[in-house]
Amino acid sequence: MLSCPQWLENLYFNYVVVLRAVTKLSDYLGSYTYCSGDPGQDEFTKQNVHSLIAAVQIAAPSFDESRMFDPSDPTLIGLKDEFRERFRNVSRVMDCVGCDKCRLWGKVQTGGYGTALKVLFEFDPHQTNGDFHLRRTELVSLIVTLQRLSHSIWAVERFREMSLNPTPPRPVTVKDNVLRYLQCVEFKPFAAAFDEEFRNIFLAVKFILKSYLLLPINLWRVLVTFMARIWDRFVIGKTVFERGTPILTQIFE
């Protein structure tokens, strides 16, 4: 990743775009009706969104969409339409992804970017914006996309710290192996463990007793088979094949 700085540039650019959209929606989200059907859950969601808004407003604005899409700049003419067309192409490409999990995350984050562009293009916090409305799915995809980008930036910082300050591997001790084993052991309730152990003992005793009961029959079968082989070989003179000889060999011999 460090050898491809354009990846980091794209990551940070996407982050500031989505962050700017959430910051621009601060007043709009303050009166948004979430309509989950549960008043308690609605209030809990609203409090979390307000906490997010308060956190994003601490930082200074890092992206100015008015300069990027300024119609008076001849070099930026058609840039907004190009953004929309490229976004539609990405949306169509995501429909062709074979992995369901990848397609789900791709559609959610694509919807988040689309919502961010919709806010940057159409929403004006200084006007009433009576015609502007975000569906709940658009708001969810926007917040989820911001969370994924934030986690990616956190991971980049962790990777950078690990690369600059590598920690030597610690040798594995017997204590580590014991702890790892204990972590894998499933401790069941006493009643369930007792029932399972009792069942195992019962099956073992049952198998032993059944073996003792069938021992005379098995010995008789072995004796009869041995006597039949002796009779065939020394009395009748018939060829006796060794055990394990294929059936076809015995038939066509």
Image (spheres, rainbow, N blue to C red):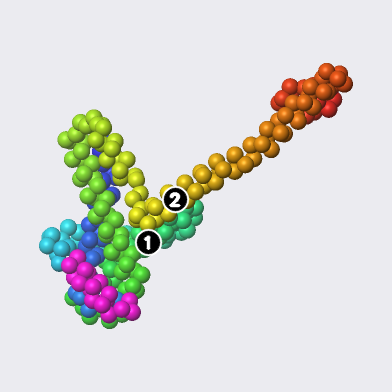
Point out the stretch of residues depicted in magenta.
35-53
Between the C-alphas of marks 2 and 1, the distance is 52 Å
Residue 12 seen in the figure: yes
Q: Which disc, if any, is residue 198?
A: 2
Give the image quarter of residue 238: top right
Residue 85, position in %: x, y?
40, 60
Residue drawn at x 49%, y 55% is: 96
Residue 165, position in %: x, y?
16, 35
Q: Secondary structure at mark 2?
A: helix
Q: Nearer the viewer, residue 128 or 224?
A: 224
Quadrant of the rendering where the C terminus is positioned: top right
Residue 70 seen in the figure: no
Residue drawn at x 36%, y 70% is: 137
Residue drawn at x 24%, y 31% is: 173
- Relative to residue 140, is residue 195 drawn left or right? right
Quadrant of the rendering where the N terminus is positioned: top left
Residue on which disc 1 sits = 108
Q: Of marks 2 and 1, which one's residue comes earlier in the chain?
A: 1
